Image (spheres, helix red, strand yellow):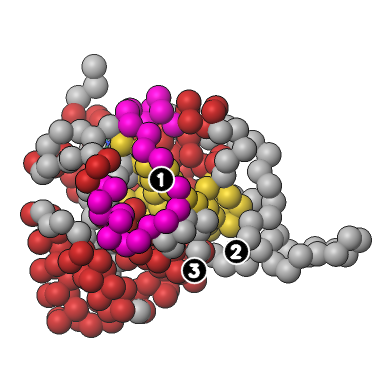
Amino acid sequence: MSTKAERFGPLPENTVLPTPQWVETPRRSKYACSPEVKEGDMEWYPPVMIGASSIGNDLTSNCTHYLKTAVNLLKKLESDAYVEYLLDYYKLGMKRYGDDWGYIDIVTAVLGLSKWLKPSNYLEIGVRRGRSVCSLASLCPDADIAMFDMWVENYAGMDNPGPDHVNKELDKFKHKGKREFINGNSHETLKSYFTENPNTYFDLITVDGDHSNLGAAEDIADVLPRLSIGGAVLFDDTGNPNVAGLGAVWRRMLEENPRFSTYTYSEVGYGVGFAIRKY
Ligand SMILES: C[S@@+](CC[C@H](N)C(=O)[O-])C[C@H]1O[C@@H](n2cnc3c(N)ncnc32)[C@H](O)[C@@H]1O
């Protein structure tokens, strides 16, 4: 049995992380490709035309715009202690630093990725009370969404009521796409979901469920092969000292992977990373 420090502490360099089982993926997605190439024409470049730092630069330089959007969104959600804290944190940061703050978190990152990629479908591991999934729904109300959670009771000391609550929150944003709740441990449910849906690829995927080093790495390895070319994967807590190994999990699985362009923000708050799949 591993200790808490081994599961959630700094990741030793020699830790073996799971490897994604890549499958043949359709080359073209609707929103991030270079122009269709005619039969016989040479396509000089790979199809994806935008990298993660273009979106990261937008998020940091227009941080006030994204934070004001996040404030309006959070105020629509049923509040809890964490949301109250975040609203005060955003307010103080904007007052002190304006756009120079350059702050990014999971909410503003989902807003930026939704704006730029306009995902048709979204997979989320770790939904809790619906904050991140509502960020997506607020900008892409027609997107189909697949939500994976085991609804751990009293998560982080707060109520974690489950699908009925999340449905009510999504209704506030007039979400019209398909909704699927896949309840249970993601280490079982993801594998069976992908076996049952062999041709499904997602345009945006958020990994924010199991926060142990190996558990988060397994979730990443399970979802990466089902990310559309040109789609983005988002990972929370790259700079969270309470789960100090997750930054290294992200670095080793995404930043060092040539299939992806990546942007990682770990300066203040809990940190967040996102990566766009090139091939
Ligand atoms: C950090 S919260 C998600 C926060 C949410 N993304 C947001 O932005 O508000 C983590 C969630 O992951 C769920 N979770 C933890 N371990 C899990 C596992 N192995 N499988 C499925 N869900 C899990 C918990 O029940 C909790 O609701």
Residue occupying the point 29% across, 48% down: 167
Assess disc 3: are there few (<14), some (14-19) or many (≥20) residues with their C-alpha within 10 Å of its C-alpha: some
Give the residue type that dot 2 points to.
Answer: Tyr
Q: Which residue is mark 1?
A: 179
Helix, strand or loop at label 2? It is loop
- Nearest the viewer among 60 and 70 is 70
Span highlighted in magenta in the image: 166-190
User: Seen in the image, is 37 located left or right of residue 31?
Assistant: right
Q: Which residue is mark 2?
A: 31
Q: Is residue 255 magenta?
A: no
Between disc 2 and disc 1, the foreground one is 1
Q: Is residue 253 above or below residue 198?
A: below
Between disc 3 and disc 1, the foreground one is 1
Q: Is residue 182 magenta?
A: yes
Give the residue type that dot 3 points to.
Answer: Trp
Q: Which residue is mark 3?
A: 116
Q: Position of residue 87 (x, y in %)?
A: 14, 67
User: Seen in the image, is 259 located left or right of residue 1?
Assistant: right
Helix, strand or loop at label 3? It is helix
Q: Position of residue 199 (x, y in %)?
A: 62, 38
Helix, strand or loop at label 1? It is strand
Task: Give me the C-alpha separation between circle 3 and circle 2.
Answer: 9 Å
Examine the image and state in which quarter residue 56 appears. Answer: bottom left
